[in-house]
Amino acid sequence: MPITFVVSTGRAGSTLLSCMLALHPQVLSVSEFFTVLQGMLRRYPYPDGDMDGRELWQLASAPDPLADALVKNGQAVPEMFYPYQTGRFRAETGVPNICHSTLSLLSDDPDSLYDQLAAQVPGWPRRPAADQYRALLGLLADILGRPVVVERSGGSVILIGKLREQFPEARFVLMYRDGMDTALSMSKFAMFKLGMLVVRAGQIAGLPANASMDQIQASLPDEFSCVLSPPYDLSGLPAMRMSPVLFGQRWSEMIRYGTSALAELPADIQSQLGYEDLLADPAAELTRLAGFLGVPGDPDWIEAASKLIYADRVGTAGRLEPHLAAELREACEPGRQALEAFLAERTSPTERN
């Protein structure tokens, strides 16, 4: 079963791409699978030891308290497709993590799909974690009759090394967007705001940058109590203002890591997709992507996918006050240079033109 990972910094258009791919009859478009494994903020260690089916299902079905808190506070993010008003599960009592984004993009009836998995997965034998993940994705592919698996988790560019280690047969698509626009979008987005609060809490507590959520919560400064710990009161999150410069720095760090990691991999197992290019010429970009995935670039699919585009999200950072724009540009410059150099190395002159 071929697996392709779409990796990005987040806020780079990859959710749009997941929705487009979900319309293709041969593609199993798996959204936010690594959010299921690591939590919404990627603050829990990547589970890579041996596990049995019961342990895998516990990972997949356990509620994520932050995800449920977002729903309860009316702040469900675009990646969360579950029918919260009509579905069986409620945020007040806990929505299985795999239902928020993964199963709800794959089916109009995610509860029934959940039940099909629940009837089989817990009985699986003990084996390496990566084999369990392959089996779960393979089961979904079989149930839905979609043989080509494409997984996309926002911010997964930081997982490239782990993904290559666990899935040596996999291929990669780097999805990227203008750094300034990305950082500005991050600064307004609930999950990135929460992520920055977690970073700040860890710094105040004197913890290392890679501290887990459990470690941070164990030393949580008073000012973050009840926001980053139960009952997760996120009502004040929309009003919080965070400088996009902070996120520009984060974008640069992620891009520099991601391009460095991808540069170590063979060129023929990876492709690149620019958000702005996708919006400007969806037919050309989707046709090229379909060729890389090994599926037909059917005109009906391309037409349907193109209708999902909103083109007013390009150049948003150009509306910033000049002084702030200059600071943001400086913060994004290391990432811009790394991305430009990587693309120049990985694409032919014809593709660049």
Image (cartoon, grey):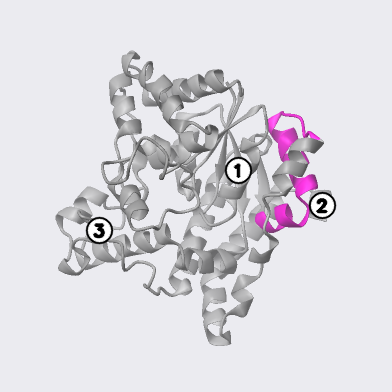
Q: Main secondary structure of the magenta part?
A: helix
Q: Are marks 3 and 1 in contact (CB under 8 Å)?
A: no
The residue tagged 3 is 228
Q: Between 195 and 240, which is closer to the camera in this rendering?
A: 240
Task: Kindly indicate the quadrant of the structure image that contains residue 18.
Answer: top right
The crowd level at tag 3 (other Cα within 10 Å; few <14, some 14-19, many 20+) is many
Q: Between 129 and 236, which is closer to the camera in this rendering?
A: 236
Q: Is residue 51 left or right of residue 315?
A: left
- Disc marking residue 349: 2
56 falls in the magenta region: no
Q: Are marks 2 and 3 in contact (CB under 8 Å)?
A: no
Which is nearer the N-term, disc 1 or disc 2? 1
Q: Position of residue 222 (x, y in %)?
A: 15, 67
| Mark 1 vs mark 2, CA separation in Å | 30 Å
| Mark 3 vs mark 1, CA separation in Å | 30 Å
Query: Which amino acid type corresponds to the residue marked 2 in the rendered image?
Result: Pro
Q: Is residue 20 left or right of residue 62?
A: right
Q: Which residues are magenta?
A: 275-298
Q: Comparing marks 1 and 2, which lies closer to the viewer?
A: 1
For residue 250, above or below residue 278:
below
Q: Position of residue 184 (x, y in %)?
A: 52, 69
The crowd level at tag 2 (other Cα within 10 Å; few <14, some 14-19, many 20+) is few
Query: Which amino acid type corresponds to the residue marked 3 in the rendered image?
Result: Leu
